[in-house]
């Protein structure tokens, strides 16, 4: 029987993969993907917990997150394209003009 | 003129704003005119001041944030009246003798803003308004030192600003806690100083609050060991900056002690007598010795300021009318005398472009007028009778003698050590043969310089011979304060030490 | 009417000073000197009229000019009292000052700061009058400090002179000597101020009469403390050991100044204070005895230094010190009127002596070394006569003034049974006679050594010599007024009568003193009248060098006080103020600065670094939350 723990473990593994991606990747596009992974990990957890408690709020929240992730990707990709056009690279090590 | 105090506070600021549109060439004349009007207004304040009334006069009160008891609340009594007049006078005299050539307009505008904050601090009766002006006064001074100062000006300006600012933040905590305690006791918020006066605090509260206020005021005074910003600020500031700093800004600290610490925390003040007297004596002796070691004439005057502020602090904690009145009087004397000395040093600096005493020598022969005025101010500084300096110093020492004869003897060495460093300045600068070719070509004071100094000389002698017009209102307010401190004190020791004068004014 | 006279006497010199000050920076104007002198003469006449009034009526005049300091419970007015004591002082001060003013017109005639000189000199007289006429202790203190500052101005009058090593000029330079005098006096003034505080806090007033009325109700230790503190003040002004070194150095000032300030008037202020506060000192026998003992010691000590000195003015300065010692001895032994009498008599002959020395200096082109003089009596007959009279008076030869006054003091010491003091005072009288006549003989008798130095001496102006004549007359006859003065002054001061026993011995005592005085003169005659014979063996002896170097006390002060003070000051500034106090402040500031500077490196501009830090922060928060959940 697949219980709540399994969903949560999957969610945690997914979140960790996303986090590692965020920390290790240098390409902005890959960073986006990694954040998407993290968001979806959270979505899984929300859905699972919602089902466990018989409370639809969590699933509703997952939909919210999907909507927000979509809009974020839309805006973010737009910025990425502009950045790429301007600098010819999406490598974070090249985009360090805010050095303090 | 019901709201003379508001006019006094905001007239220079408004005039300063208007000053931005004044033509560059006439900026100086404009500034002098405004300062003169302001000075006349402050004289009018004195003229219509009722000397027999020891309480607050010309009171104005407009609630600003009624929920928190913050209001626009101004008033003067005998203690603050003359400091206000001195502030306006020194601004005027300083502007008259100003020798700055570049950015004169900015300087004038800055000075006028500074004047607003100075007057504001001394007439504010609401703690928030007081704090506002207190902090605002740092900004124009920062600008004056930082923009017109010597080679180390940025370091000196930032040191001055951060040091005093750090102290006043602790004072702000004290102010807020005071209001909080007031709220707990009475159920209403109030930042009015007069309301706070009426509050009797437990001794441990008093001690904590006294400490918080002490740090804010002590850095401003400046008391040993918080004094090191002062020589830098004076050393780097242009003449006008030093004049205002020494004459008025330092008095904010000692004024704070009279306005807040003494009447609000009588028991804590009595407990603090010994430590403060100890620090004051260190200030008097130590800085007098350091002053003697200086090579730069301006630094001598700067350190001598610290030494004289020690006398003032000692007088404030004499807890009798002689000492405190003398101390307030000494604030005025020190303001005028050290202001004049800084002006004199500035005049020689303008001519020689150095302040090293070893480059001078024999100036008395080429600049007799200058030497005479410097000599008079020196004598006032060392407290010669029939000058202003004596009245204050004598009363302070007399007053403190009642607390501790031994400490008075130690503090009294100021009359010896003061003579040592000031006379050695005179000897190195004015006497002896002329060794420097540049000295031979020096020109004596210009009429403008002479006329900006002569009023100060006259005041120094007038108030030395006949201090009554100034001393009497001060004394009345001080006596009222002491009576009220005595009533308020909780501990029997404090009741015993705080001495109610036998001759309370005839007219209440 | 009498009030007006008081004000005229007091303010005429002040007006003279202001008048001269108007021309202070201008060219030499003889009329400035004349006006100042005339105003002083007016003051003198007014003082004499007041004196006559006081003598006739016997009542003091008390005027209250205005309030001065009113604060707390203290009330200090400008009040003046003209009684027997102050009127005596007023007459002496204004008389000597008038003579000195007229003298200065001649003496200073080549000085370009002529006008300034008169301004200072008249200001001094004004301060001195405030000192003696004031009716309260603080008023006295005004005058006290006022004469101090005038003395500073006048000693340092030739401020342009450079500093020289002590071997060349023992007083280094006029400005140095002036500062030394002022600072030493300030040390004593602190004592005086403390005395004033003690009096105020125990009696609640500073008016003489009110204070004295309350003295019997005060505990003895307070009386002692007040007397000691006031006497410390007196020690400074009257240059008593150990605050005596400034007086000889003050001879750097123009000679009329030495005559007026450092002989006749200002230095006697200390004695005046003791006389003025006699009810206090009369109630403190131990302090009074100390005063007498110190006075006797100083009398001897100063006379010993005068024995070998070569500087004309310094010899007279030492003799002044010595005579001040006599005055304190008398005052300390309770013979206040005798002290005052000696003060007045001394003022006359000492001023005369100094002015004579000024004539010699004028003639010798500012040469002061008596070893370079000799035989001057031929060219300077009148000066010789004056200085001779003054020296006879100083030596205490009858019938000159000094005989009466000094003899009375020595008798007092005998009468009190303080035989040690008596012996010292008698020996000192012999030494006084010796050094006075050593100076007279070396200056006016013997071979004309000045010729080797190419100096052509000449007698002083006629009007100056005439102006000096009143002093000469008084130096001769003042002694005869003793019985009359005694009667007059003891209406105010406590009487002092010799005991029956002393009366019987009086002729013997006088004979002993006279024998010492004449012996001193005879010895001086034997050694110096024929000219200068220098004996290198004597001059290199330890005692001779000790005396010639003033017991090395100036050097001692220099090494033990001035230099360490300067060194400690320098160390406090460089080591403590900059290295400790200021460095601590800067360290605190630097701590914040470097922390910020170190943390700044986090801000790489690299987004992935930021994200890493964000993760660290998130983990840290989680840990904190978890920990607080576990602990809480």
Image (spheres, helix red, strand yellow):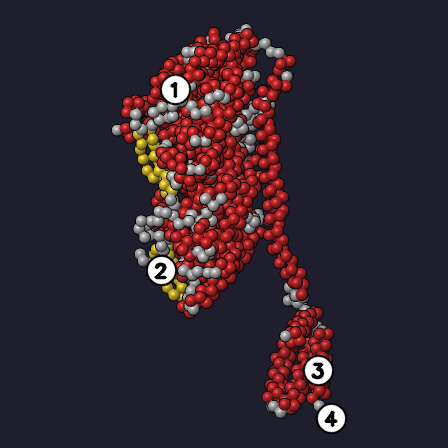
For the point 58% across and 51% down, the residue is: B155
Q: Above or below — where is B371 with respect to C522?
A: below
Q: Nearer the viewer, mark 2 or mark 3?
A: 2
Q: Chain of mark 4?
A: A
Q: Above or below — where is B310 with respect to B117?
A: above
Residue at the farthest bottom position: A1
Q: Which label is found at residue B60?
A: 2
Q: Are marks 1 and 3 on the same chain?
A: no
Q: Is residue C361 left or right of residue A12?
A: left
For the point 53% across and 10% down, the residue is: C524
Q: Residues within 10 Å of mark 3 (few under 14, many from 20)?
A: some
Q: Residues within 10 Å of mark 4 (few under 14, many from 20)?
A: few
Q: Residues within 10 Å of mark 2 (few under 14, many from 20)?
A: some
Q: Which label is found at residue A12?
A: 3
Q: Are marks 2 and 1 on the same chain?
A: no
Query: Quick check: can you spot residue C203?
Result: yes
Q: Mark 4 and mark 2 in contact? Answer it, CB < 8 Å.
A: no
Secondary element type, mark 2 = strand
Q: Which residue is mark 1?
A: C99
Q: Above or below — where is B247 with respect to B172?
A: above
**Residue C381 figure quarter:** top left
Q: Which residue is mark 4?
A: A1
The span from disc 4 to disc 2 (Cα, nearest Å) is: 81 Å
Secondary element type, mark 1 = helix
Residue B75 position in % (x across, y down): 37, 56
Q: Residues within 10 Å of mark 1 (few under 14, many from 20)?
A: many
């Amino acid at each position: 029987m697949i219980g709540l723990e399994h969903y949560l473990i999957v969610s945690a593994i997914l979140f960790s993969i996303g986090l590692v991606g965020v920390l290790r990747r240098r390409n902005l596009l890959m960073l986006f993907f990694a954040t998407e992974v993290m968001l979806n990990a959270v979505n899984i957890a929300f859905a699972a917990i919602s089902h466990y408690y018989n409370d639809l709020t969590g699933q509703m929240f997952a939909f919210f997150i999907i909507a927000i992730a979509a809009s974020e990707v839309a805006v973010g990709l737009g910025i990425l394209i502009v950045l790429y056009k301007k600098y010819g690279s999406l490598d974070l090590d090249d985009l360090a003009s805010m050095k303090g | 003129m019901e709201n003379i105090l508001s006019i006094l506070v905001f007239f220079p600021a408004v005039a300063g704003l208007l000053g931005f549109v004044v033509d560059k060439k006439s900026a100086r004349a404009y500034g002098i005119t405004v300062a003169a009007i302001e000075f006349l207004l402050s004289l009018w304040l004195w003229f219509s001041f009722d000397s027999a009334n020891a309480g607050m006069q010309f009171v104005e009160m407009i609630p600003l944030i009624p929920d928190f008891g913050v209001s626009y609340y101004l008033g003067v009594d005998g203690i603050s009246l003359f400091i206000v007049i001195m502030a306006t006078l020194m601004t005027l005299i300083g502007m008259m003798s100003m020798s700055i050539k570049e950015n004169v307009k900015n300087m004038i505008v800055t000075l006028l803003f500074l004047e607003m904050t100075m007057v504001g601090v001394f007439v504010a009766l609401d703690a928030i308004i007081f704090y506002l002006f207190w902090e605002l006064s740092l900004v124009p001074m920062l600008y004056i030192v930082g923009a017109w100062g010597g080679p180390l000006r940025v370091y000196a300006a930032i040191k001055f600003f951060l040091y005093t600012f750090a102290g006043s933040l602790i004072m702000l905590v004290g102010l807020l806690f005071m209001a909080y305690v007031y709220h707990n006791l009475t159920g209403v918020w109030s930042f009015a100083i007069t309301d706070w006066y009426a509050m009797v605090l437990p001794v441990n509260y008093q001690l904590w609050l006294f400490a918080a206020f002490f740090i804010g005021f002590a850095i401003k005074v400046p008391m040993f060991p918080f004094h090191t910003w002062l020589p830098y600020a004076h050393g780097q500031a242009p003449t006008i900056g030093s004049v205002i700093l020494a004459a008025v800004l330092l008095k904010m600290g000692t004024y704070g002690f009279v306005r807040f610490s003494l009447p609000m925390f009588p028991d804590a003040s009595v407990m603090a007598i010994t430590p403060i007297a100890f620090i004051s004596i260190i200030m008097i002796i130590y800085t007098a010795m350091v002053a003697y070691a200086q090579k730069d004439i301006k630094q001598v005057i700067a350190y001598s300021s610290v030494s004289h502020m020690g006398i003032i602090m000692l007088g404030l904690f004499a807890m009798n009318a002689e000492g405190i009145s003398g101390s307030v009087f000494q604030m005025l004397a020190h303001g005028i005398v050290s202001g004049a000395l800084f002006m004199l040093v500035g005049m020689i600096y303008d001519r020689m472009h150095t302040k090293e005493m070893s480059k001078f020598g024999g100036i008395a022969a080429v600049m007799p007028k200058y030497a005479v005025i410097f000599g008079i101010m020196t004598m006032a500084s060392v407290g010669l009778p029939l000058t202003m300096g004596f009245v204050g110093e004598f009363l302070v020492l007399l007053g403190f003698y009642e607390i501790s004869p031994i400490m008075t003897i130690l503090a009294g060495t100021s009359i010896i050590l003061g003579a040592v460093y000031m006379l050695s300045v005179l000897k190195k600068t004015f006497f002896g043969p002329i060794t420097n070719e540049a000295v031979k070509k020096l020109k004596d004071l210009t009429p403008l310089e002479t006329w900006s100094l002569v009023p100060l000389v006259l005041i120094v002698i007038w108030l030395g011979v006949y201090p009554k017009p100034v001393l009497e209102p001060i004394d009345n307010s001080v006596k009222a304060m002491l009576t009220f401190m005595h009533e308020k004190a909780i501990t029997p020791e404090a009741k015993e030490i705080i001495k109610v004068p036998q001759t309370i004014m005839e007219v209440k | 009417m009498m009030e007006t006279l008081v004000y005229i006497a007091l303010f005429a010199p002040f007006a003279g000073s202001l008048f001269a000050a108007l021309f202070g920076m201008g060219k030499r104007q003889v009329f400035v000197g004349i006006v100042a002198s005339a105003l002083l003469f007016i003051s003198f006449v007014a003082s004499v009229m007041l004196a006559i009034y006081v003598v006739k009526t016997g009542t003091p005049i008390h005027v209250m000019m205005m309030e001065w300091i009113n604060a707390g419970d203290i009330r200090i007015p400008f009040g003046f009292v003209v009684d027997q004591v102050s009127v005596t002082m007023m007459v002496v001060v204004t008389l000597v000052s008038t003579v000195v003013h007229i003298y200065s017109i001649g003496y200073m005639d080549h000085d370009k700061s002529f006008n300034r000189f008169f301004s200072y000199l008249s200001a001094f007289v004004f301060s001195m009058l405030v000192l003696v006429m004031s009716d309260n202790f603080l008023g006295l203190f005004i005058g006290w400090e006022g004469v101090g500052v005038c003395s500073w101005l006048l000693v340092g009058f030739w401020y342009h002179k450079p500093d020289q090593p002590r071997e060349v000029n023992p007083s280094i330079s006029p400005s140095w000597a002036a500062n030394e005098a002022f600072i030493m006096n300030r040390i004593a003034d602190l004592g005086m101020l403390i005395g004033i505080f003690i009096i105020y806090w125990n009696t609640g007033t500073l008016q003489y009469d009110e204070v004295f009325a309350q003295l019997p109700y005060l505990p003895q230790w307070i009386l002692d403390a007040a007397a000691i503190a006031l006497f410390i003040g007196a020690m400074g002004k009257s240059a008593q050991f150990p605050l005596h070194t400034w007086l000889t150095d003050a001879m750097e000032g123009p000679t009329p100044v030495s005559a007026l300030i450092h002989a006749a008037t200002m230095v006697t202020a200390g004695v005046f204070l003791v006389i003025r506060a006699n009810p206090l000192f009369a109630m403190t026998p131990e302090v009074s005895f100390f005063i007498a003992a110190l006075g006797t010691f100083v009398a001897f000590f100063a006379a010993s230094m005068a024995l070998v000195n070569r500087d004309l003015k310094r010899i007279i300065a030492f003799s002044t010190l010595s005579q001040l010692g006599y005055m304190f001895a008398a005052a300390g032994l309770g013979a206040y009127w005798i002290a005052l009498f000696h003060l007045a008599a001394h003022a006359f002959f000492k001023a005369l002596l100094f002015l004579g020395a000024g004539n010699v200096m004028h003639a010798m082109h500012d040469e002061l070394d008596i070893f370079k003089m000799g035989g001057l009596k031929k060219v300077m007959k009148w000066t010789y006569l004056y200085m001779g009279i003054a020296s006879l008076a100083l030596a205490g030869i009858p019938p000159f003034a000094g005989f009466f006054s000094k003899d009375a003091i020595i008798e007092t010491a005998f009468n009190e049974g303080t035989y040690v003091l008596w012996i010292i005072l008698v020996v000192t009288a012999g030494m006084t006679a010796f050094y006075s006549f050593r100076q007279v003989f070396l200056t006016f008798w013997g071979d004309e050594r000045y010729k080797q130095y190419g100096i052509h001496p000449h007698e002083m102006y006629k009007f100056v010599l005439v102006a000096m004549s009143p002093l000469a007359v008084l130096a001769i006859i003042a002694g005869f007024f003793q019985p009359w003065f005694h009667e007059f002054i003891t209406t105010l001061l406590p009487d002092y009568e010799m005991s029956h026993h002393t009366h019987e011995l009086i002729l013997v005592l006088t004979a002993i003193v006279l024998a010492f005085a004449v012996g001193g003169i005879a010895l001086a005659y034997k050694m110096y009248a024929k000219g200068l014979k220098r004996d290198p063996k004597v001059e290199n002896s330890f005692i001779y060098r000790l005396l010639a170097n003033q017991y090395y006390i100036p050097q001692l002060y220099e090494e033990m006080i001035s230099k360490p003070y300067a060194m400690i000051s320098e160390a406090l500034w460089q080591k403590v103020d900059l290295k400790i106090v200021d460095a601590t402040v800067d360290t605190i500031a630097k701590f914040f600065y470097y922390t910020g500077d170190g943390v700044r490196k986090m801000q790489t501009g690299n987004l992935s670094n930021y994200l890493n830090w964000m993760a660290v922060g998130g983990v840290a928060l989680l840990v904190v939350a978890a920990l607080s959940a576990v602990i809480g």
